Image: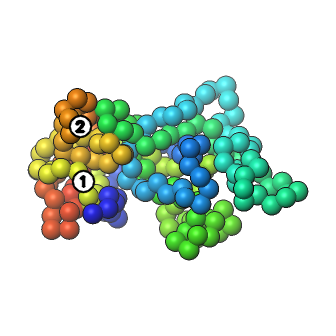
Amino acid sequence: MAYKLRPFRDYDEHDVLNLFSYDTTNLSAGSINITKGSLVKIATGWKNYDSGVELGGGIEFIGGAGTLQPTNVVSQRYGVTAKVIVSTTGETPIGMTLYDVRDADENGELLKYYPRKAAEMQAVIPGQAVPVVTRGIFLVQGVLGTPTAGGTAYAGGTGQITSRTGDSAGNIANVAIGKFLGAADINGETLVKLAL
């Protein structure tokens, strides 16, 4: 079962960080797809003396000369310099993404040319700020392990929420991120109170 952030959510906008874009340095164009509900950590921090945005750099359609950039065309876009990446086992996340990070839709069309479709899909294009929530109540599907009502929620391996206290070998301890408000239902959906 795929891990998903379901539509039921209860959070305050003051608990959402809109200061970071997703670091796509090691991802190839056309394959960027980070799902909403992924737990993320800081890759490149925000700097007070910096403008917070960059022109070019990072990925081909933010301004670099990538494989999909037409010859003799300069169509630069600004991108956020502070970046996050998916957290892994034993790392403390700063929050959970509320939108997908995608560069293409289900048909392979690049979303940079269709910003309206990106908005309808609740997706941000790489380089744009991705909303990261730090606390609230969320319905998630596909939690790893067996969540129980009142049990502790942990940050798992690939940005997923888990009920397991550590990795499968027992070597690395997972970081507590909140509480489960119920067990998984028949659809594998669990209510989680996130508190980071």
Q: Quadrant of residue 109?
A: bottom right
**Residue 80 in picture, x, y percent from top left:** 63, 42
Extreme residue toward the front, this view = 169
- Indicate the secondary structure of the residue bearing disc 1: loop
Given residues 143 and 6, the one toward you in this image is 143
Amino acid type at circle 1 is Val
Residue linked to disc 1: 143
Q: What count of labels does the image hold? A: 2
On-image quarter of the C terminus: top left
Is disc 1 in contact with disc 2, using a CB cutoff of under 8 Å? no
Q: Nearer the viewer, mark 1 or mark 2?
A: 2
Tell me, for residue 9, which label it has, or none. none
Compare marks 1 and 2 and give the one earlier in the sequence: 1
Q: Give the alpha-carbon distance from disc 1 to disc 2, as whole Å.
A: 15 Å
At 72% from the left edge and 56% from the top edge, which residue is drawn? 67
Mark 2 = which residue? 167
Q: Residue at x 56, y 44 (%)?
A: 26
- Image spot of residue 44 (x, y percent): 55, 32
Q: Position of residue 163 (x, y in %)?
A: 19, 45
Q: Residues within 10 Å of mark 1 (few under 14, many from 20)?
A: many
For the residue pair 43 and 79, the one nearer the viewer reads as 43
